[in-house]
Image: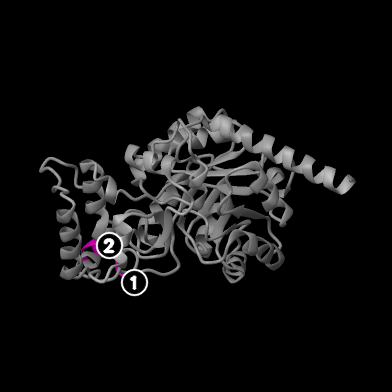
């Protein structure tokens, strides 16, 4: 398979796989696509270890890193040295009490005294994402992607100076144009079906609009889980696919077990766009957690990054207590067909085989 993105990155297959799991990233790259490691949950020191491991296990194949540098968020003008403290002070006590009441209603205990302190901020801000970028650019990555809006122009320039191409996700044609204006090389047109942060326009509608709006290669994202959908994306003008939720249940994934089981059992109706995780709309597994934030008792969600800072400890407590009814996770509508555990390599090869079958079926139609 050959498109502009396969030529740009020197890969065999125009399949990009976003994952927070290094094993998945390496496996996809070795299978001919490109794995992209989500850096959000790692400290710079941890990211260094993850990327060093990938360097040693990817057999010289190209891979990428995805960071989150939102265009707008609370505290953007706060100095880095007291960023966390000032943001913590902005969280209303009523919101903290709502979370505690929700956990108590479901019997979720506090964390033990010897539990690690956790991370209340992660890479949700410019100040916390830039160290991740610096670490990433010390490694032989082929792609730096930004998940929320156009990356800062100086970061794009920094990546280009290292010979690294830049991608950014867009949920509208207007967003795509803004990203091209700052110099991104690839636009990921992500429809509302996708897991995690996503807009309101469906993939089928969005892709041709973005393709017509920009002159850089476009990747189709949102609801891409088999080769037929991959063929549809390329038929709409995309030059590859960006996948994420598809890899949550593969053998190599480190998805928390409760979330994995829920994903395997889910239908495509079992997700919802919710601000309850980060403060921005993100598609998550629908359950009593997401329902609670939409209820009449809810104080409403807080803007990014305050919402995640508010709920980060709660999410850890839920995970450690096995409270399945509160266990949510970023996941797209494609989880309705991810109902078995397979190897990453098998999933990649299935995508290619199904893609070829789709093209053969279309060829028969046009010939007849």
Residue at 59% x, 38% y is 62
Tell me if 159 is positioned left or right of 130 in this view. Answer: right
**CA gap, disc 2 and disc 1:** 32 Å
Q: Which residue is mark 2?
A: 292
Element carrying mark 1 = loop
Residue at 15% x, 64% y is 97
Vertical relation: 79 (above or below) 287: below
Residue 138: image location, x then y, percent: 47, 43
Residue at 73% x, 46% y is 3
* Residue segment shown in magenta: 76-85
Residue 18 in magenta stretch:
no
Residue 4: image location, x then y, percent: 72, 49
Q: Nearer the viewer, residue 306 or 257?
A: 257
Numbered mark located on residue 278 in the image: none
Residue 77 in magenta stretch:
yes
Element carrying mark 2 = helix
Q: Nearer the viewer, mark 2 or mark 1?
A: 2
Q: Nearer the viewer, residue 326 or 83?
A: 326
Residue 326: image location, x then y, percent: 28, 51
Tell me if 105 is positioned left or right of 248 in this view. Answer: left
Q: Where's the N terminus, which quadrant?
A: top right
User: What predominant SS class does the magenta segment belong to?
Assistant: helix
């Amino acid at each position: 398979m050959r498109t502009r993105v396969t030529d740009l990155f020197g890969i065999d297959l125009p399949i990009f796989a976003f994952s927070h799991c290094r094993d998945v990233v390496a496996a996809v790259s070795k299978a001919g696509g490109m794995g992209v490691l989500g850096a959000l949950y790692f400290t710079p020191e941890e990211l260094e270890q993850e990327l060093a491991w990938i360097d040693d296990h990817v057999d010289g194949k190209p891979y990428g890193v995805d960071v989150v540098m939102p265009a707008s968020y609370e505290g953007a003008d706060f100095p880095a040295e007291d960023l966390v403290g000032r943001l913590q002070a902005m969280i209303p006590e009523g919101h903290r009490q709502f979370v505690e009441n929700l956990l108590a209603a479901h019997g979720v205990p506090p964390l033990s005294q010897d539990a690690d302190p956790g991370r209340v901020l992660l890479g949700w801000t410019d100040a916390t994402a830039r160290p991740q970028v610096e670490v990433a650019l010390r490694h032989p990555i082929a792609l730096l992607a930004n998940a929320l809006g156009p990356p800062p122009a100086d970061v794009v320039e920094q990546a280009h100076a290292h010979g690294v191409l830049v991608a950014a996700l867009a949920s509208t044609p207007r967003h795509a144009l803004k990203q091209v204006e700052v110099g991104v090389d690839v636009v990921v047109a992500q429809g509302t079906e996708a897991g995690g942060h996503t807009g309101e326009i469906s993939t089928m509608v969005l892709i041709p609009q973005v393709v017509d709006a920009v002159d850089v290669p476009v990747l189709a994202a949102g609801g891409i889980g088999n080769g037929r959908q991959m063929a549809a994306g390329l038929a709409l003008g995309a030059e590859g696919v960006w996948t994420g939720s598809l890899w949550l249940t593969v053998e190599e994934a480190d998805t928390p077990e409760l979330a994995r089981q829920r994903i395997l059992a889910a239908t495509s109706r079992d997700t919802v766009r919710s601000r309850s995780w980060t403060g921005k709309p993100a598609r998550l597994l629908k359950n009593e957690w997401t329902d609670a934030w939409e209820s009449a008792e809810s104080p409403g969600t807080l803007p990014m990054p305050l919402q995640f800072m508010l709920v980060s400890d709660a999410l850890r407590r839920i995970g450690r207590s096995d409270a399945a009814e509160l266990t949510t996770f970023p996941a797209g509508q494609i989880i309705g067909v991810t109902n078995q555990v397979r190897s990453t390599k098998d999933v990649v090869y299935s995508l290619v085989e199904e893609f070829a079958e789709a093209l053969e079926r279309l060829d028969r139609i046009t010939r007849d």
